[in-house]
Image: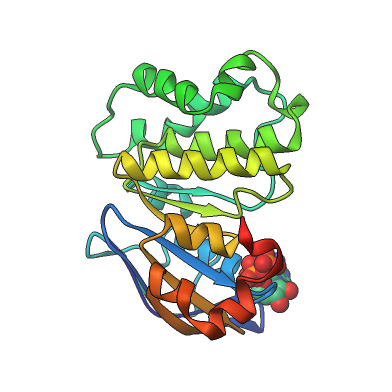
Amino acid sequence: MLSIKNLEAGYGKVQVLHGISIEVPKGKVVTLIGSNGAGKTTTMRAISGMIKPNAGEISLHGKRIDGLESYTIAKQGLAHSPEGRRVFATMTVTDNLILGAFPRLTGSRPKGDVDGDLQRAMELFPRLKERRNQLAGTLSGGEQQMLAMARAVMLNPEIVLLDEPSMGLAPILVEEVFRIIGDLKARGVTMLLVEQFAAAALKVADYGYVMENGRISVHGEAASLRDDPAVKAAYLGGGGGH
Ligand SMILES: Nc1ncnc2c1ncn2[C@@H]1O[C@H](COP(=O)(O)OP(=O)(O)OP(=O)(O)O)[C@@H](O)[C@H]1O
């Protein structure tokens, strides 16, 4: 479904990604783990067109998407729930969700049932349902994070990029985020997940890639990475036991 080959990208003259290759098959959850500054967010940004790659290929369903504008990529069914709380603060929760569906209404993909999807998003995220008429800027940080995720789901995407969906959340909300990721997986949604809670990410994922200094150092079935002594020592200690 999503295929990345020898991707190089960065910011200005600073190269961050030094030729990374990742495959995300349809219906699978793939996680990208690595220490701070390894280049995980940069990878997500390059895939969704927020930054332009310097070299390499990114294909969605066998068609090249590298170099296209973010909006064009979203129309093809790739949703990006970015790191941090990127919601429209002065709009209600419901309006933020409806905006998430907008790229599909103007693209060539089936437009689907926006009202039905809105109901389903509210069921998946009960906290948002309770607050559907509240302005997004007045939600707590965790609720805004969930809204960003729910808005990505409203694209009815072929694939969702989830960048640190649990960042800054209280433990109970972290559990809820992982429950939601599990629900989306059960519904067959393809996902590329970046998570600080590497152990939890490797539990929900089918496959994992470990990134170090802009390169993939190890990759394999999620279960085998969980048992890999080097991965355990570097990424699954301490807070990773979630
Ligand atoms: N907008 C930017 N301009 C310049 N350099 C940047 C920018 N964003 C990130 N970088 C640099 O790119 C490198 C990779 O950052 P990136 O955010 O991709 O790492 P990450 O693996 O997602 O880390 P974290 O887990 O801390 O979020 C870092 O050295 C960072 O300082």
Residue at x 64%, y 63% (from the top left corner): 240
For ligand 1, which image quadrant applies?
A: bottom right
Residue at x 43%, y 21% (from the top left corner): 118
The N terminus appears in which quarter of the rendering? Answer: bottom left
Q: Is residue 129 above or below residue 142?
A: above
Q: Count how many numbered circles sit on residues in the image.
A: 0
Q: Quadrant of residue 197?
A: bottom right
Q: Is residue 26 left or right of residue 104?
A: left
Q: Is residue 87 above or below residue 11?
A: above
Between 179 and 159, the one lying in front of the other is 179
Q: Position of residue 164 (x, y in %)?
A: 61, 54
Q: Is residue 60 left or right of residue 205?
A: left
Q: Quadrant of residue 105?
A: top left
Q: Is residue 142 above or below residue 74?
A: above
Between 117 and 45, the one lying in front of the other is 117
Asked if residue 196 shows in the view, the reply is no
Q: Position of residue 83 (x, y in %)?
A: 64, 53
Asked if residue 8 shows in the view, the reply is yes
The C terminus appears in which quarter of the rendering? Answer: bottom right
Residue at x 69%, y 74% (from the top left corner): 37
Q: Position of residue 173 (x, y in %)?
A: 65, 38
Q: How is the image coloured?
A: rainbow
Q: Quadrant of residue 192?
A: bottom left
Q: Position of residue 47 (x, y in %)?
A: 45, 63
